[in-house]
Image (cartoon, rainbow, N blue to C red):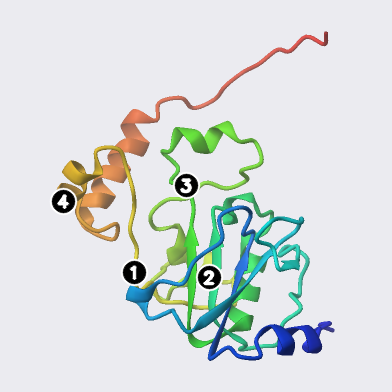
Amino acid sequence: MIFIDEQFLKKFFVDAKRKGIEFCCGDNPYKPQQKLNEMDIKILHTDKSKGKFVEMILDCEKQPLPFPNNYFELVVIQGGIEHLNDIYAFMDEVYRILKKGGIFYCDTPHFSNPFYYWELDHKHNFHSRSFHSWTEDFGDTSMNRLTKGKFKIVWSDYSMRFGKIIKPILGDMQSRRFQIWEEFFSRWLSYVVFMYFRMKKI
């Protein structure tokens, strides 16, 4: 059974033409993009701890989420999905609370980003095709059984060092040239396979 604070939602979205929600907003809340026609979307910024921009205390890993089915036009998580324990359960909930045609926006470190490995709270790393696990063109049926929701990737991008020079060469993240580069990096440049430590208590 899903507990929904209908009074809070009604009050918060009272003047909203369209509704959005951000999980794990932290100190950098998502701002609606004019070029994406999002200016009429009111976004509820949530996090599991209090913060300057947090409007609702919510742990997005405690499911089901306290929202009706097909409720939001936009769901956002920025730099947060790599911290979650069960990404499939989270994405099933995103699919449930999004309206048909609604947009899920996510950004996350690429597996080659050295800063990704510095933070031990990062539980997952991502390849350019990781999010294809939730699309119809993903061929591995054993993986498809792990998720209920289906999406279509309508836009993707990436940032990198010397991007102004390199990105025009590699092309879009879904392009074959980018995927060849990514495969080359993972096969030949990521040569550290295991690490071993002995630690002395002090």
The answer to whether residue 111 is above or below residue 57 is above
Name which residue type carries label 2: Asn
Task: Name the spot of residue 123 as percent of width and height, x first.
Answer: 63, 45
**Dot 4: few (<14), some (14–19), or many (≥20) neighbours within 10 Å?**
few
Labels 1 and 3 touching (C-beta < 8 A): no
Along the line of sight, which residue is nearer the eye, 5 or 146? 5
- In the picture, residue 147 is in which quadrant? bottom right
Task: Name the spot of residue 50 as percent of width and height, x first.
Answer: 76, 56
Task: Name the spot of residue 114 as percent of width and height, x first.
Answer: 46, 33
Task: Name the spot of residue 140 as percent of width and height, x first.
Answer: 46, 65
Q: CA distance from mark 1 to mark 3?
A: 17 Å
Q: CA distance from mark 1 to mark 2?
A: 21 Å
Name which residue type carries label 4: Pro
| Labels 1, 2: front one | 1
| Labels 3, 2: front one | 3
Q: Which label was assigned to residue 144?
A: 2
Q: Residue at x 38, y 81 (%)?
A: 37
Q: Which label was assigned to residue 168?
A: 4
SS class, disc 1? loop
Labels 1 and 2 touching (C-beta < 8 A): no
In the rendered image, which residue does mark 1 sit on? 155
Q: Earlier in the sequence, mark 3 or mark 4?
A: 3
Name which residue type carries label 3: Pro
Q: CA distance from mark 1 to mark 4?
A: 17 Å
In the rendered image, which residue does mark 3 sit on? 109
